[in-house]
Amino acid sequence: MGTPEYRTCPYPVYQSLREQAPVCKLTTRHGVDTYLITRYEDARLALSDPRIGKDMHEGIEIYHAVFGDTCDALDDNLIFADPPRHTRLRHIAHEAFTPRHVKLLRPRIEQLADELLTKCPTDTPVDLMTAFALPLPVMVICELLGIVGDERNDVLKWFGQVTRSRFSKEMGDELAEAEHWLRNYFLGLVARKRAEPADDFLTVLIQTEHEDGALTDDELVSMMWVLLFAGHKTTTYQIGNAVYSLLSHPDQLALVRADRGLLPQAVEELVRFECSVETSTFRYALEDVEIGGVAIPQGSLVQIAISSANRDPEKFAEPDTLDVTRKGLQSTHLGFGHGPHYCLGAPLARMELETALTALLDRFPEMVLATPETGHEEWLKGPFPAFRGLEKLPVALDPSRTVDDWTATASG
Ligand code: HEM
């Protein structure tokens, strides 16, 4: 694991694990023992097993071992919570994330996608990650949270600093400074919204009452942080993976081009086939548990290999084949997780993926990969170990106009 071959294609490794060590004990780079679950049925059960918890307050020593001493207010959110705290946070988040709010965003997402594609040159190759897949979800999540204008660039700068520092273990003053800046910024945003409520997502988040109380300011800050984090890289890499998968499977692309009605199920298949979330977030055993015949001692970390479960032949016929006509995937693949921590933003992510692919297919129906070898080197090298995505995706949007010397002109 971690070799260039593994990065490019981890699936043979996962196949061996499913066959020979489906619940496999690994040691994380932080030196903590983790049990990695690779088979579909075990994965699905583990994702909803109440004996496998996530609450960082209970498991604070384990979290400190993994994340250093940075488990602070920003992390006090639903990703690191168990019932009843998780139930309350999730209930309030759900009120704000209604289908109505998500639906209201569609025209704006279409407009943003259109604006980004209008700026792309067609006479030279374009790195679709930089030009499209990265900015679109960032703009969408910022709009949802009410982060507008120049403030957006500041937020993204400090956000990038927090994520880089956390994942690279450089947890010094820089990290503290960035976390401090973001916390104060989010508090200011909440104060402004309290003073001027509107018909929007943040107002609902602030005003929703639960029987155990509305969100406190600290909880609001953590919620905004987790939405920014969870709603951004995931969707960026998923757009890239989806476009790459279609362009490298022209027969499947042709099917979608010929029948746009296939798009919703194609999106599910694209998430199953090449999911941007390779492994789940960390959990830990609240008591001794047995999964797939393996005893997991209380206190051990547990991670679910989503990319492996989604390619398990016991669940999906010919799992290594991309087939956009597969049916019934929405309730089976684990690309958005399963159980109480099922992706809160799944409806938004699905809509963003559909909108992004529609915009690309409408405007650039002949688009091709600019370099045939794309995908061999570009798979993410880090610093986000749980994600699977491309660092670059050079495409010729209109091959009839694009100059021949693609590799020389592809820019990042
Ligand atoms: C294609 C894009 C996305 C993918 C593949 C994805 C995938 C996932 C997965 C697998 C989980 C479960 C993690 C676990 O149980 O360990 C999750 C949780 C979550 N996702 Fe997403 N996600 C995407 C987009 C989004 C968006 C756009 C948002 C919000 C705007 C979002 C917000 C969340 C939140 C808040 C959670 C935690 C839910 C909880 O713990 O109760 N995600 N996502």
Image (tube, rainbow, N blue to C red):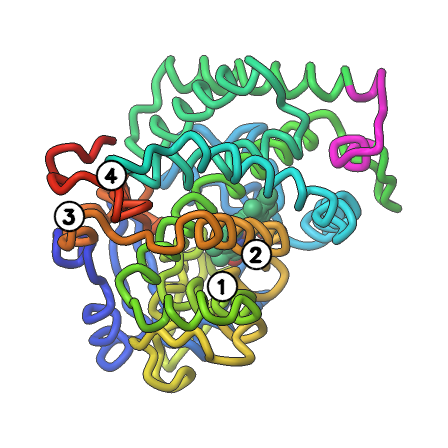
Q: Earlier in the sequence, mark 1 or mark 2?
A: 1
In this picture, which residue range is highlighted in magenta?
193-206
Q: List x then y, in percent, for residue 59.
A: 50, 46
The residue at which mark 1 appears reads as 267
* Disc 1 packing (10 Å; few <14; some 14–19; many ≥20): many
Q: Which kind of residue does numbered mark 3 sit on?
A: Glu
Q: Earlier in the sequence, mark 3 or mark 2?
A: 2
Disc 1 residue lies near ligand 1 with CB under 8 A: no
Q: Earlier in the sequence, mark 3 or mark 1?
A: 1
> Which residue, as the protein is rendered here, is positioned at the far front?
400
Report how far apart the C-alphas of labels 3 and 1 lie in the structure.
Answer: 25 Å
The residue at which mark 2 appears reads as 350
Q: List x then y, in percent, for residue 132.
A: 42, 38
SS at circle 2: helix
Report how far apart the C-alphas of labels 3 and 2 lie in the structure.
Answer: 27 Å
In the image, is residue 194 part of the stretch drawn in magenta?
yes
362 displayed left or right of 398? right
The residue at which mark 3 appears reads as 377
Instruction: Determine whether label 1 and label 2 are within 8 Å by CB.
Output: yes
Report how far apart the C-alphas of labels 2 and 4 lie in the structure.
Answer: 27 Å
Label count reads 4
Nearest the viewer among 45 and 324 is 324
Q: Which kind of residue does numbered mark 2 sit on?
A: Arg
